[in-house]
Image (spheres, grey):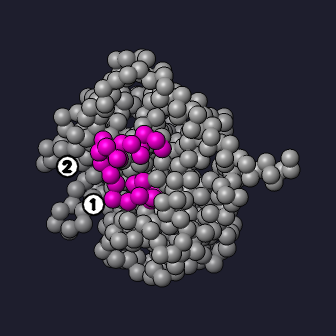
Amino acid sequence: MSESESASQQPEAEEQAGERHHQRLLSIIPKQRPLRPDPSGRYFINEAQHDSTRLAARMIPLAAPHLLASLTNLLATAPPSLPWSGAFAKGLYCGLFVGPTSIAYLFLWLSKTHPDLLIDGKSPADYCAAYLALDQDKYGPEETNRSGCSLNHEFMCYNAVKACHTQDLRYVRAFVDNIDKLTMRPAFIEVLFGRAGLLSLMRTVKYFVPAAGEILDPHVDAVIEHCLSYDPWTFGVRPDHQKRYIGAAHGDIGIIASIVLSNASYAPRVQPRLERILALQLEDGNWPACDDDDSEKKGEELVQFCHGAPGMIWCLVAIQPFFPDLRDRIEAAVDKARGVVWEKGMLTKEPCLCHGITGNALTLTEPQRSHFLFYATAGIVKNGLADGAFEKSSDESGLWWSEAGRAWGWMMMDYEQSGRGNSLRDIGFPGVTNP
């Protein structure tokens, strides 16, 4: 058999292996009641806390078949073609959040971690290019109320991902030439809509295009100084309703991570803010959503990436090497946080990275990680959505909220299973803690 013939049969063989593994898992799971939601409705009761047989039955020794299954579903649900099939906001492109550029970003990273993977004879680089050719140039450079200035801004994300894929510095220059024009909300510092997200995008461009460093470095430092000029950091769509969020998507820990991962020399300047976050950890291991003196600590039951312990773990693990004086405190906080994720992190929303089982699973270690990710396998997700056990996402394909995010999780798990490193540090959360 030729090398090309062998490669073309790889997806089919892996898909069959994945199905056999899935059926084996189903056959050995002890008969049980359906998943029972907690009275809050936010998460399922994790009966594996007290039943080791359930935990052992859900080990996932091979993530690769599940990665392939997820990517196959993604390509069927949201193929790289026009008109775009995305459901979120009537098909609106939203950078790395949802839309074709977010999927291109997944395939960009797969071209790094799994360059030889083939689906229908095409590589991750091929699919990255295809998802970057869906009329993204129709989205203008201006900042709008809905776009923010960074991870949700289609023009900025498209130029960043296009630069990474093509190695063409013209896209880097288009990106930096627009930074100073994003002036609608200068006080937005958080990651998803604010300046910290610009740092993440520039960091990724430098990672994939080292030659871009000379262009980007002055802008990285300027954006960091802009971020540090605000104290406290607040976020809110309405000027009269600002909150001091501390979580990964909209608050302090995500901003700190973006700053330090972009330029480690700023670690001493943000260390007091990090110490404040560590001090806010609740007794059960979670964090409140906000650091507001007048708040009622609402949000302590939110256990997801954007608010709560999972996002803290993603960020703390990534930045720990840059705070040697806080190493023991960070390790203790992460260990404690994993306890509340294990107890309350099997979320009832459709498995995804931002507020679902996938994002929470990746903050755990084995065998707990496999137990969570079992509920993010293709068959379980399909059945859970069909019978209403999972609350369906408003998007069917995007990176933060849906199938592309599940594929990101399988990519990370396979990366670790193949012995290549710590995926939380080497890959990270897209647009927040990734290199």
Total numbered labels: 2
Q: Nearer the viewer, residue 85 or 169?
A: 85
Q: CA distance from mark 1 to mark 2?
A: 12 Å
Q: Examine the residues drawn in magenta and state their main secondary structure.
A: loop
| Label 1 crowd (10 A; few <14 / some 14-19 / many >=20) | many
Residue that numbered label 2 is attached to: 292
Looking at numbered disc 1 in the image, what kind of residue is underneath it?
Answer: Phe
Q: Quadrant of residue 229?
A: bottom left
Q: Earlier in the sequence, mark 1 or mark 2?
A: 1
Q: Examine the rendering and report whether any part of residue 344 can be seen.
A: no
Tell me which segment is drawn in magenta. Answer: 378-402
Q: Which residue is drawn at the image coordinates 52% and 32% (left, top)?
A: 23
Residue 164 x, y percent position in the rendering: 63, 65
User: What element does badge 1 sit on?
Assistant: loop
User: Would residue 94 appear left or right of 61 to someone viewing this image?
Assistant: left
Query: Which label belongs to residue 359?
Result: none
In the picture, the disc for residue 235 is: 1
Q: Is residue 262 above or below residue 171?
A: above
- Is 63 or 362 nearer to us in this picture? 63
Q: Position of residue 28 (x, y in %)?
A: 48, 22
Q: Secondary structure at mark 2?
A: loop
Residue positioned most to the right: 2
- Please tell me which residue lies in front, 126 or 160: 126
Under mark 2, the amino acid is Asp
Residue at image coords 58%, 74%: 133
**Membership of 308 in magenta stretch:** no
Q: Quick one: 112 or 382, which is closer to the camera? A: 382
The quarter of the displayed image where residue 383 is located: top left
Residue 217 spot, x, y in % from top left: 58, 65
Residue 361, percent from left and from top: 44, 37
